[in-house]
Image (cartoon, grey):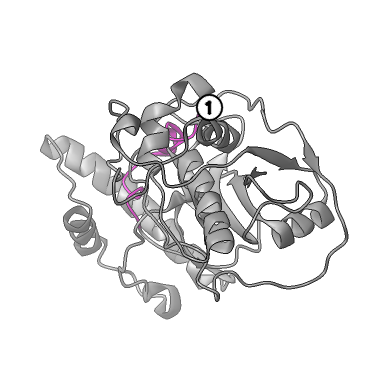
């Protein structure tokens, strides 16, 4: 977990907004961020009634919602079979009464192997070398309620979770320091931070993004909007609306250090998203392996 450092603040408590920007990523394998996908509104009443659903109708709804096109009837049948297996797995899980609820989303017609293709990256070599040590704080702060956390965003089919995690942390940091919430450009980090170790839509790391912003600043989302694919860097074409002076790592396996850092600032976090429960997560709190 890393958090950004803003110029002109006390180095021991300089991170700004106390909020966790979570990205669902496979650490050491690849990122597919926060999986900020648009969750389906398909009726999952089968979870409570136990009735056999009309899976064919659900599949047709899925195809329409997510604009699927299959080149041949054979491919469509294969995708339907995969969808049906995933649909029943989701339904059976929801009937078990967990505190989290799963739902059909844009990954429902993919095999596990295809889904894992979104989750691959080399081992992280963090450049946020300093560690944030615990001060034992216990205060509670809700930056969401204070309007200092941006909306949930959708990275689409680009493995850019690292950019969304870093941008989310910096947006909250800016909101706390300046009093207003501005959305920053994930697309700039996708397009422009290769020399810092990121790989566009093939994954990256939050600390690499932070170090890019140290050197170059970052544009707003309004100016440099998200495309969901790699493109030529256009950073020089847009105004720099925010910059930081560095980043720090939270001490590993130290909950107090994380909580303390949250009091001081905003964190960029990567979570192992290889579990099928993260893959189809819809709402609630995951309470099982």
> Which residue ends up furthest to the front in the rendered image?
8
From the image, which quarter does the N terminus lie in?
A: top right
- The magenta segment is 105-121
Q: Residue furthest left?
A: 72
Residue 30, image x and y in percent? 52, 32
What residue is drawn where x is 49% and y is 26%? 198
- Above or below 255: residue 120: above
Identified at 63% across, 28% down, the residue is 124
Measured as percent of width and height from the top left, residue 190 is found at: 39, 33
| Residue 36 vertical position relative to residue 216 in the rendered view, above or below | below
The residue indicated by pointer 1 is: 121
Q: Residue furthest bottom?
A: 49
Question: For this rendering, which residue is in front, 282 or 13?
Answer: 13
Indicate yes or no whether the magenta region holds residue 31: no
Q: Is residue 2 left or right of residue 97?
A: right
State the quadrant of the C terminus.
bottom right
The picture places residue 8, in percent across and down from the top left corner, at 66, 48
Vertical side of 151 occupied by 229: above or below: above
Query: Residue drawn 50% across and 71% down?
Result: 147
Q: Is residue 109 left or right of residue 287?
A: left
- The quarter of the picture where residue 248 lies is top right
Q: Is residue 159 visible?
A: no
Q: Is residue 149 above or below residue 86?
A: below
Mark 1 residue element: loop
Q: Is residue 30 visible?
A: yes
Q: Residues within 10 Å of mark 1 (few under 14, many from 20)?
A: many
Asked whether 201 or 84 is in front, the reply is 201
């Amino acid at each position: 977990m890393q958090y950004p450092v803003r110029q002109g603040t006390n180095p021991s408590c300089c991170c700004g907004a106390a909020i966790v920007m979570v990205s669902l990523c496979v650490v050491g394998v690849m990122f597919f961020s926060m999986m900020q996908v648009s969750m389906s509104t398909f009726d999952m009443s089968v979870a409570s009634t136990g009735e056999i659903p009309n899976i064919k109708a659900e599949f047709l709804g899925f195809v329409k919602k997510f604009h699927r096109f299959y080149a041949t009837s054979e491919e469509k049948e294969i995708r339907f079979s995969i969808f049906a297996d995933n649909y029943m797995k989701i339904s059976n899980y929801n009937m078990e009464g967990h505190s989290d609820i799963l739902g059909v989303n844009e990954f429902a017609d993919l095999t596990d192997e295809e889904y894992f293709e979104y989750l691959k990256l080399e081992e992280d070599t963090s450049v946020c070398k300093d560690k944030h040590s615990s001060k034992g704080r216990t205060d509670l702060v809700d930056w969401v309620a204070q309007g200092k956390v941006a909306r949930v965003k959708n990275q689409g089919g680009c493995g850019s979770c690292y950019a969304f995690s870093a941008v989310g942390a910096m947006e909250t940091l800016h909101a706390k320091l300046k009093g207003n919430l501005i959305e920053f450009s994930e697309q700039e980090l996708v397009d422009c931070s290769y020399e810092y170790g990121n790989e566009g839509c093939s994954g990256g790391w939050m600390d690499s993004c932070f170090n890019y912003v140290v050197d170059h600043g970052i544009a707003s989302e309004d100016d440099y909007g998200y495309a969901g694919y790699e493109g030529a860097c256009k950073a020089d074409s847009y105004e720099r609306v925010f910059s930081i002076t560095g980043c720090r790592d939270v001490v590993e396996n130290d909950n107090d250090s994380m909580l303390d850092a949250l009091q001081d600032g905003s964190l960029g976090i990567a979570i192992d998203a290889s579990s099928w429960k993260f893959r189809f997560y819809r709402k609630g709190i995951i309470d099982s392996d």
